[in-house]
Amino acid sequence: MRPPTDNTEYANMPAMDDQADADRSTAPVDPERVGQAETGHRARRTFAIISHPDAGKTTLTEKLLLAGGAIEMAGAVRSKGDGRRAKSDWMDIEKSRGISVTSSVMTFEKNGITFNLLDTPGHSDFSEDTYRTLTAVDSAIMVIDAAKGIETQTRKLFEICRLRDIPIVTFVNKIDREGRDPFELLDEIEEMLALSVAPVVWPVGQGGQFKGCYDLASNDFLAAGRTRDVTHTEGLDDPALAALIPADIHAPFRDAASLASEGYADFDPVAYRQGHLTPVIFGSALQNFAVDRLLDLIAAHAPSPRPQPSDKGPIDPDGDRVSGFVFKVQANMDPKHRDRVAFVRFCSGHFKRGMKLDHVRSGKALAVSNPIYFFAQERARTEEAFAGDVIGIPNHGTLRVGDTLSEGESFRFTGLPAFAPEVLRRVRLEDSMKLKQLRRALDDLAEEGLVQVFRPSIGSTWIVGVVGPLQLDVLASRIAAEYKADVTFEPVTSSVARWIRSDSESALAAFIKENITHVARDRDERPVFLCRDDWDLRFTMERNKDIIFDATREIVGQ
């Protein structure tokens, strides 16, 4: 991990845990004191960034790393040269297309706070990876394009956050470009997401007239321009502020900022952590405006690790015994070594390198001798971790998504979702001599969650299931690049897949026998019913009332 830097910024309010909410002060504090007051898991902030594609999520990720001192230079995703690629987009296909297709984890420190930043794919075709990643975070940043407002994928991801009671900070991006009226955007957030909004940083001008940002809590003016001067003022009516902004921009800005302060809710840290209110920061990730304020707010007010659900009840982060769960597996992060790394979110205890943890699914002890912290594709060995931390455990297939690790306790974490695929295709191998490579590729990539693999009861070909067609492009690209096998995908007669189960074993066996040509097995040998379309599914369900057809299932280490 990189050491904290001396680049401190001004936070809006002090930070305390929810137990101290009644004693919370409303005076601004130096963010350095936040880290000094918190240690162990209370000094962890594990958060995701969610958005619709092209809202600027990956650029914001880089600028947060820059604000945290984790990198010295930020490079645009589409800049020339590999040296200026986005740090969180490390796969070849991500670099070539300028999109995120897999979740990345980046751990860094600033002022005594350890940030675990999880960058998620914005494209809906990779939503399953995003949903699982959201089970491992305690808060989220929602990025909105100032010209577009709330978009489809943003709303879907927000609903997942709502279901998990994940508090959200809103960053309205690209305010330096022509966009919608800020009040219109605030009203849209309130109406579409049913959240109270609290403007925290307000734009001074917009588009071609953009002159900077104003922190409504600290009364700091962040000026645009090369110098990026920060001027503390006595308020919106301070003559010193008027002297810094052209008159034709200052007057409408002052009126708008006053109306925003009076017309919307004040920032309440308790309401934010309870998911009833979202603080809103207007800024520009590309121009690095207000990004430091965003990081300060996360440090000061985002929740430290929260209790995690399990089959034995919530697991408290204050617990002495170490526990965690695997929310992601990534194959070939280092293509030279064909490695497989399990991403583990710790939920309680104080982990130390070399500890033996119980692998609940297998009932065996697992010695964790080489735990690693991530910085996208880069990694470094770590000696310890606390609740809220995300580490990687290199392994050869021992750990799978949904697995629970614990220190002498037998329980399973719950809440990781799997979804029925929406696109089904038959795999066609161009070179039959590469069958072994294909088998390994499908096994590895299914374990990651990139694809679901089904083996029909009759026939020898594999059928893959994905959420959207872009996943097929990524799948073919990765099989070619990482396993040296060329594949294409052919249409199948089925377009709908459902896991099937029943309270009656005999009824399930009879159904499978009667529909053997439409039944396949997934990689866990669960029976899956494949049918032509939704009408065919409804017809089959009407005729088989004792069979349960599941569109989703929970991943729990069995």
Image (cartoon, rainbow, N blue to C red):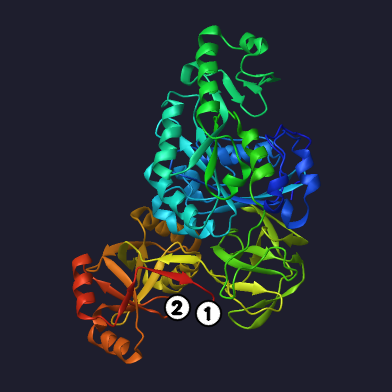
Find out whether the residues at labels 2 and 1 contact each other: C-beta distance under 8 Å: yes
* Direction from residue 129 to residue 376 in the image, left or right: right
Q: Determine whether the residue tagged by mark 2 lies in a helix, strand or loop.
A: loop
Residue in front for this viewpoint, 175 or 451: 175
Q: Position of residue 177 (x, y in %)?
A: 46, 24
The image shows a total of numbered marks equal to: 2
Q: Position of residue 234 (x, y in %)?
A: 69, 18
Neighbour tally class for label 1: few under 14, some 14-19, many 20 plus, Cα within 10 Å: few
Instruction: Return the residue at label 1.
Output: 558
Q: Earlier in the sequence, mark 2 or mark 1?
A: 2
The residues bearing labels 2 and 1 have C-alpha atoms spaced at a distance of 10 Å
Looking at the image, residue 315 lies above or below residue 270: below
Residue farthest bottom in this picture: 506
Looking at the rendered structure, the kind of residue marked 1 is: Gln
On the question of residue 83 being in view, the answer is no
Looking at the image, residue 164 lies above or below residue 452: above
Report which quarter residue 8 is drawn in. top right
Neighbour tally class for label 2: few under 14, some 14-19, many 20 plus, Cα within 10 Å: few
Instruction: Return the residue at label 2.
Output: 524
Q: State the residue at coordinates (76%, 61%).
A: 384
Q: State the residue at coordinates (55%, 21%).
A: 258
Q: Determine whether the residue tagged by mark 1 lies in a helix, strand or loop.
A: loop
Residue in front for this viewpoint, 241 or 526: 241
Residue in front for this viewpoint, 396 or 208: 208
User: Which label sits in the foreground, 2 or 1?
Assistant: 1
Report which quarter residue 335 is drawn in. bottom right
Q: Position of residue 426 (x, y in %)?
A: 30, 68
Q: State the residue at coordinates (45%, 74%).
A: 436
